[in-house]
Image: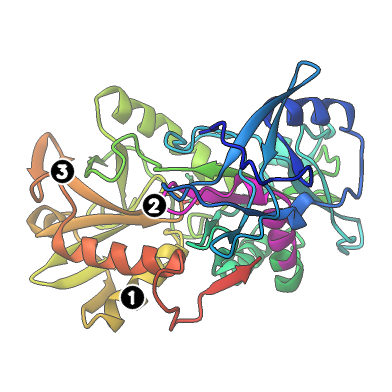
Amino acid sequence: MERAVISPSLNQNYLLCPSRAFSTRLHSFSSSTRNLSPPSSSSIKLQHSSSSSSVLSSVSNGGASLTRCNAVLSNSSSTEVSELADIDWDNIGFGLKPTDYMYVMKCNIDGEFSKGELQRFGNIEVSPSAGVLNYGQGLFEGLKAYRKEDGNNILLFRPEENANRMRNGAERMCMPAPSIEQFVEAVKETVLANKRWVPPLGKGSLYVRPLLMGTGAVLGLAPAPEYTFIIYVSPVGNYFKEGVAPINLIVENDFHRATPGGTGGVKTIGNYAAVLKAQSIAKAKGYSDVLYLDCVYKRFLEEVSSCNIFIVKDNVIATPEIKGTILPGITRKSIIDVARTQGFQVEERNVTVDELLEADEVFCTGTAVVVSPVGSVTYKGKRVSYGEGTFGTVSKQLYTVLTSLQMGLIEDNMNWTVNLS
Ligand code: COI
């Protein structure tokens, strides 16, 4: 990614940007630092090379590798872009890449959240008796930030929806939750503080992971007396190893993800631990993920371990309705709205496994997976394939509209994106 190009006309008015090696050292000596001002305003002017990528140069500084950003060029063709972290943006995948800062906000015994603050990203300390560790009192969220074409502006996708869903989940799990304003402000601050980790347009996104957990000590079964809200972020690429190629699902007949009256409809951490067994068995057999059926009739589709499911038949789109056992996905909801504005009929209802096997097209939606085409489904040993190894026509259309909107490539008539710069 780094290239040694220094403009001869550049004076010594440059910025030294921490490279990975440098930021690691920073982390280790400042882990107890509090109230750090985020380097979010370190937006600089970079000269465009012919390939239009940022012009960066490596310099050596007493053994520490620093990246020099060619700054403040008066060239009128220069565009305002922010510095980028020094990683291989072409191979990000979906794994944690520690970034610079995380956001931490505590809630005391009176249910009041204190003012949160940015801290260096790092480990946290909790009591072995914390509610989250002993009784699973925890929720998480997931949303994404995209870098716009100009290289500087960042778009968040519907953060208030995540705030709202966390509040609903907290109510179910007997936890206090940040207000919608607190949540959205915290997300903005965290993303801006980690701005250099937002991938260039087309290379991925910054995945934002808010957590809410009972960190107060309990022994008898009860809600924890104190709570912690944390946001960390990581640049991500495609969720499935297949990339944007179709995934292969197995319909699970024995394990269930959720039960009526349970917590399947909220984003509690235990829902995800509960699917690991079926998922690992499926992966060992070569499947990408598991599709769950309802636990009463074993006949109606629920969701995949990490995403919601849609089928298309004769150009009509159907997806399981939200009824307490299915996560109300924000991408699910957005795709339904996008599809309707594109003129499709969309039905939220019970969808049977027989309909799945007869469908023209099947696809999944989720923050992490975005829109993922399904290439095959295996049910009781019978494998049914869809399409020609690529996106189906309908899912491709919906994927294109949604992602163009998320990346700011088309006008946001839905008013879903939040611009940060
Ligand atoms: C998301 O899509 O954001 C999720 O929370 C799913 C998770 C399994 C990565």
Would residue 318 be found to the left or right of residue 359 on screen? right
Q: CA distance from mark 2 to mark 3?
A: 16 Å
In the rendering, at what x and y percent does residue 382 appear? 8, 38
In the rendering, at what x and y percent does residue 289 appear? 32, 38
Dot 2 or dot 3: first in sequence order is: 2
In the rendering, at what x and y percent does residue 141 appear? 59, 54
Q: Residue furthest top?
A: 63
Label 2 residue near ligand 1, CB within 8 Å: yes
Q: CA distance from mark 1 to mark 2?
A: 18 Å
How many residues crowd around disc 2 within 10 Å: few (fewer than 14), some, or many (20 or more)? many
Magenta region: which residues? 185-209
Q: Can residue 322 be seen at all in this image of the molecule?
A: no
Dot 1 or dot 3: first in sequence order is: 1
Identified by mark 3, the residue type is Ser
Identified by mark 1, the residue type is Val
Residue identified by numbered label 3: 376
Q: Is residue 228 magenta?
A: no
Q: Is residue 290 above or below residue 366?
A: above
